[in-house]
Image (cartoon, coloured by chain):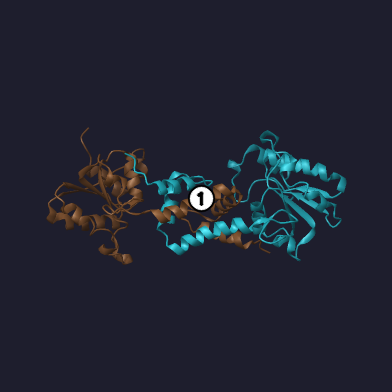
Chain colours: A cyan, B brown
Amino acid sequence: MAYTVAPLERLIEQLERLPGIGHKSACRLAFYLLNTDKATAAEFIGAITDAREHIHECAVCCNLTDGDTCPVCRSENRDRTTICVVEDARDVMALERARDYHGLYHVLHGTISPMDGIGPDAVRIKELLPRVADEQVKEVIMATNPTVEGEATALYIAKLLKPFGVRVTRLAYGIPVGGDLEYADEVTLRHSLEGRSEL
Amino acid sequence: MAYTVAPLERLIEQLERLPGIGHKSACRLAFYLLNTDKATAAEFIGAITDAREHIHECAVCCNLTDGDTCPVCRSENRDRTTICVVEDARDVMALERARDYHGLYHVLHGTISPMDGIGPDAVRIKELLPRVADEQVKEVIMATNPTVEGEATALYIAKLLKPFGVRVTRLAYGIPVGGDLEYADEVTLRHSLEGRSEL
């Protein structure tokens, strides 16, 4: 006989739907959520509800925000001549953590992927064009992921931006810092050779 | 400038409190919970609330259940002469998955740990005694974890059960099936030698 308690099974099932959470982790999370005190559980649920209610896309760059525009677009310390185009809001967080980029962003919320029926209209490309048309913008950095779809999207946008006469650049490919040559794939190695710089 | 959106930060913080979830996983989960459709999110939150409302301890064995007693205690196919004592409800699930035990359980909800100020009264030991006093019970299997606290708890309970004249046994120690001798620690190896059986 299998030991089943319906609400517990349901909770575990729901937790298993989270990305990267297998059955064993889901069990551990379920027991944590069951055993924690009432206030902590309420806070947890409140954070989900609250985030879903208050977070939406920035009216300018489509980044996630709880205001009209995002903190980057609102800031007066950002360089308004550069726009960095990324696939999603997580990429903005990653680049902000690097603390080396001071321009604006544009979040596509996906990539063009004809194989999956995702055309240019399904991502926020048309929102980018009026921003680039603004004469302040001098450079657009394509920072889509180094995948087939990311590549294709970057090339597609670069072609669209040609008439505007802005500089369109691409993040450098190469060996990750702290990585190991031995474990780098051939394509990355080829790119790191091509992009080698003087010492 | 760090890019922060308060409700998103709060959600990530809450997810980081889950056991085994680091910052990167918390970000991934947060974006999943944000981007999923409304019904899925409601189901997820509902499962947590529901489980917390309806799950409590079985009146007999302290296992988790949504009824008065748990499915194991209610079942008419279980062997009522054996009680297996485990630390928590997850251990019941693990043993039930093995499909080899057909007796009853007793869930302690913890172990005695004088170092952390957890005495015998903080775990469900006193609930076990009247069950063993029932003359049906012939054997109590101690299945606490093979840690110092689990060991101590098992020995403490064994001593308490002595006057009842029931057989008190302990799960076997040894090398895990599929494991590697090379990676087994000395104590486990010593136990597996002591407990060796005829082929």
Please state which of residues A141 and B61 is positioned toward the viewer in this rendering: B61
Percent x, y for residue A102? 73, 60
Hey, which quadrant is residue A52 in on the image? Answer: bottom right
Percent x, y for residue B137? 17, 48
Per the image, label 1 sits on a secondary structure element best described as helix
Please state which of residues B111 and B59 is positioned toward the viewer in this rendering: B59
Determine the residue positioned at 80% across, 44% down: A158
Left or right of B112? Residue A150 is right
Hey, which quadrant is residue B159 in on the image? Answer: bottom left
Please state which of residues A172 and A63 is positioned toward the viewer in this rendering: A63
Q: Chain of mark 1?
A: B
The quadrant in which the N terminus of chain B is found is bottom right
The quadrant in which the C terminus of chain B is found is top left
Which residue is the site of mark 1?
B44
For label 1, the crowd category at 10 Å Cα-Cα, with few meaning under 14, some 14 to 19 and many 20 or more, is many
Left or right of A25? Residue A185 is right
Amino acid type for the residue under numbered disc 1: Phe
Taking the view exactly as shown, the residue that stands out farthest to the front is B68
Q: Is residue B12 visible?
A: no
Percent x, y for residue A21? 49, 46
Determine the residue positioned at 48% across, 45% down: A16
Percent x, y for residue A197? 74, 48
Left or right of A188? Residue A43 is left
Q: How many marks?
A: 1
Q: Is residue B181 visible?
A: yes
Q: Is residue A10 above or below residue A113?
A: below
Hey, which quadrant is residue B52 in on the image? Answer: bottom left
Determine the residue positioned at 36% across, 49% down: B90
Left or right of B25? Residue B169 is left
